[in-house]
Image: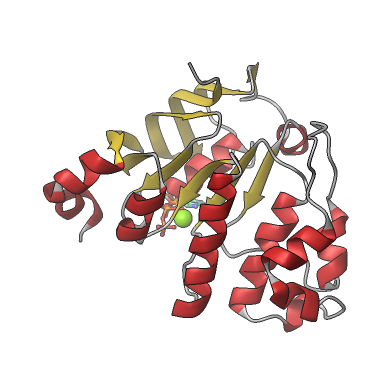
């Protein structure tokens, strides 16, 4: 049996008086790629914010690598081994590409084959070319590559991508999907949010669909493809 890396159960999260998650549950096993899907405003980003302690959940369980993390501060949760590629990328605009990559780098889990600047440059050659450029000067696609590279440089047990390819040009999207496929081949555990169901069902092992802050469906890619009705009902496709 694979080890459970992330386990969310019965999570409720609010912004002030406005409740957004209503008992959400989700699991990621070690080495799995799991997709989190749902229409706009259904609570995907809020789920990520709850996991990371950025908008702490009001109730429920969030366990990561065997530890209850629900009431921990964000920096401690990140240090346990979660690398986040946030919605909107949020790279440091006034640092160079190189500085962005090394700013939070580390190998806290002591992995035997850690990410290095050279490996990130091999993954995204564009970042090598832009090495000394300020973050603010990068295109959207370059920013996303940098956000992924920055997260990988922390050698995370779990990589989370909130909108992996949103707003990117088709060629760049392909590059991001190829990168995810390579990471999966390396055994990297990934939780990914994206709107491209066709690509997600090619690459992810399992899927969760959420609606108004609740998990309404979970299953494998085969099951998702076999039920086109689901996509129509919950994803508006
Ligand atoms: N900071 C906030 N304060 C108050 N309400 C918020 C805040 N952020 C999000 N919400 C609300 O919470 C709900 C869920 O938002 P969330 O960003 O989690 O959705 P999402 O599934 O990530 O959507 P999208 O696909 O557009 O990224 C929405 O109704 C949104 O308006
Ligand atoms: Mg979102």
Colour option used: secondary structure
Residue 121 location, x and y as percent? 76, 67
Residue 68 location, x and y as percent? 63, 18
**Could you tell me which residue is drawn at 57 percent across and 43 percent down?**
49
**Could you tell me which residue is drawn at 22 percent across and 49 percent down?**
234
Is residue 119 found left or right of 34 in the rendered image?
Answer: right
Count of labels in the image: 0
Res. 211 visible in picture: no
Quadrant containing the C terminus is bottom left
Residue 57 location, x and y as percent? 54, 30
Q: Which of 237 and 211 is in front in this view?
A: 237
Residue 177 location, x and y as percent? 49, 62
Looking at the image, residue 110 lies above or below residue 190: above
Q: Which of 76 and 23 is in front in this view?
A: 76
**Could you tell me which residue is drawn at 70 percent across and 77 percent down?**
126
Looking at the rendering, which quadrant does residue 217 occupy?
top left
Is residue 192 found left or right of 195 in the rendered image?
Answer: right
Is residue 83 found left or right of 21 in the rendered image?
Answer: right
Q: Nearer the viewer, residue 47 or 182?
A: 182
Res. 139 visible in picture: yes
Q: Which of 108 and 233 is in front in this view?
A: 108
Looking at the image, residue 221 lies above or below residue 163: above
Is residue 35 found left or right of 94 in the rendered image?
Answer: left
**Hey, which residue is sitting farthest left in the picture?**
229
Looking at the rendering, which quadrant does residue 175 occupy?
bottom right
């Amino acid at each position: 049996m694979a080890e459970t890396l992330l386990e969310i159960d019965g999570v409720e999260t609010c912004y002030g008086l406005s409740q957004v998650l209503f008992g959400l549950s989700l699991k990621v096993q070690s080495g799995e790629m799991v997709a989190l899907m749902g229409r706009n405003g259904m609570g995907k980003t809020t789920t990520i914010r709850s996991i990371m302690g950025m908008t702490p959940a009001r109730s429920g369980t969030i366990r990561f690598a065997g530890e209850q993390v629900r009431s921990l501060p964000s920096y401690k949760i990140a240090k346990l081994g979660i690398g986040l590629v946030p919605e909107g990328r949020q790279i440091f605009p006034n640092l160079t590409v190189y500085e962005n990559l090394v700013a939070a780098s580390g190998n806290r889990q002591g992995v035997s084959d850690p990410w290095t600047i050279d490996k990130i440059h091999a993954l995204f050659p564009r970042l090598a070319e832009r090495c000394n450029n300020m973050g603010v000067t990068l295109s959207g696609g370059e920013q996303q590559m940098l956000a992924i590279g920055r997260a990988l440089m922390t050698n995370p047990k779990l990589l989370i991508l909130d909108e992996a390819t949103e707003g990117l040009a088709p060629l760049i999207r392909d590059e991001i999907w190829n990168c995810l496929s390579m990471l999966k081949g390396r055994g990297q555990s990934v939780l990914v949010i994206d709107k491209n169901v066709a690509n997600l069902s090619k690459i992810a092992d399992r899927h969760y669909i959420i609606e108004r802050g609740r998990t309404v469906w979970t299953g494998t890619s085969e099951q998702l493809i076999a039920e086109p009705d689901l996509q129509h009902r919950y994803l508006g496709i």
